[in-house]
Amino acid sequence: MIRNFKEEERRKDLIVLLILIAVFMVVVWLCTPSGTKFVRLAFWGSNIRLSWAKLTDNADATEWIFHRNNAVYLSKMKNKDGSFAEIDKAIMTFPSYQSENNLEQLYKDRAIIRLYWKDYDGALEDYLRLHTLDFMDNLRVALLLRESRKYKEALSYCNNILYLDPTAYAGYVCIASLYDDVGKYDVAAKVFDILILKVPNKAKYYADRAMYKRKAGDEDGYNKDIAKAKELSPAINFNYSLIDEIMNPKILQLSSMPVN
């Protein structure tokens, strides 16, 4: 009886503490810049829910999800070290009885977070843990291998993209980027010759080829391709780069997971 009474009192004290923490967080939130208010509120809410799960002894199955979500929130709040610590905790607390697919997805999420923070070695390490790579994963791995000057291995991932789709823009961008990286700009331009023969009506393909022609010193070819790109798409954005979008992401392409 006494033990049950003490346990109930301890539980009540913890509930009061959680309420006080929640009130404090709301006050701090009101003073937080508007750009991160909702992300910060989601982060605090996640931690309160995790504390409650631990209090009620229901955390074993879900703790990893809270840590994974916290890593996403902290990245969006520009907290690199905190994000890395949380995603590592997610992997450490992942239950052994959970699906192998969920664990693989968790490593992929960590790879995306590491890539967001330009930890290229760490991102590559996690991507190479995966048994299955989707279309864009192959491009990410190829570009990460390019960073390590592992061009032969990178080329195999570029070819994986073209195996899935012989006219995939990402596959040709991938191969051309490898030649670009070693200064073979004329060969990079020829890669786009092949794509344009297959798909002759895409303005972006001419714009990319123009860039490589200029690097190779072919100013006349550059001007012709720029003119063709404008003809096909007068509003084309010449500054857009798929490679830059992958290697220097401005937005973390992850959202929170539901906690059952």
Image: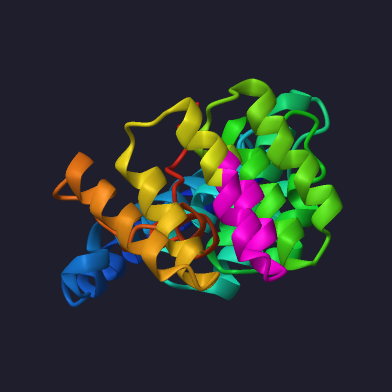
Question: Where's residue 184, x and y in %?
Answer: 68, 65
Closer to us: 9 or 213: 213
Name the residue: 78% across, 26% down.
100
Is 179 in the magenta? yes
Task: Determine whether, in the image, residue 190 is placed left or right of residue 52.
Answer: right
Name the residue: 53% across, 62% down.
116
On the image, which quarter does residue 251 sit in? bottom left
Q: Is residue 209 visible?
A: yes
Q: Residue furthest front?
A: 220
Name the residue: 56% across, 64% down.
83
Name the residue: 27% across, 65% down.
36
Closer to us: 141 or 87: 141
Question: Where's residue 7, x and y in %?
Answer: 60, 46
What count of labels does the image hold?
0
Closer to us: 76 or 1: 76
Q: Quadrant of the N terminus?
A: top right
Is 235 in the magenta? no
Q: Please give the range of residues in magenta.
A: 172-191
